[in-house]
Image: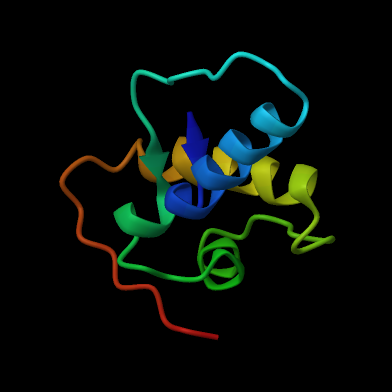
Amino acid sequence: MIAHNSSFDSGVLKKNLSFYHLSPICPREWICTCEDLGKASLYSACKYFDIPLDKHHNAVADARAAAQLYLKYSKMPGEYLEIPKL
């Protein structure tokens, strides 16, 4: 499971599943683009990688952006990135 702030997103997912009386899911692994990119904000990381983020804080838009971030930086193994805060 890929998320930009996985500690927040995993909590939201857990609460929603519980609210709707659905079985909990346990992803094998959470990949947190926020942690992987030095705690850069989603906005800053998207600007750095030239990823459009038209509806920031919209769940679908943020999920797409996190996936695109992961796809871009995962092709740069071993590179240290210092993303400026915007």
Please, which colouring scheme is shown? rainbow
Left or right of 76, for residue 44: right
Q: In this view, does 2 lie above or below 53?
A: above
Q: Is residue 41 above or below residue 35?
A: below
Position of 35 relative to 69 (above/below): below
Residue depicted at 80% across the width and 55% down the height: 58
Which residue is farthest top?
Answer: 23
Q: Nearer the viewer, residue 53 or 10?
A: 10
Q: Which residue lies furthest to the bottom in this view?
A: 86
Q: Where in the figure is residue 39, as x and y percent of width and height?
A: 36, 68
Q: What residue sits 60% from the left and 13% below the top?
A: 23
Which residue is found at the position 31% from the left and 53% from the top?
36
Question: Residue 44, image x and y in percent?
Answer: 54, 73
Name the residue at 78% across, 26% down: 20
Quarter of the figure with residue 37: bottom left
Q: Which of 41 and 20 is in front in this view?
A: 20
Residue 80 x, y percent position in the rendering: 20, 60
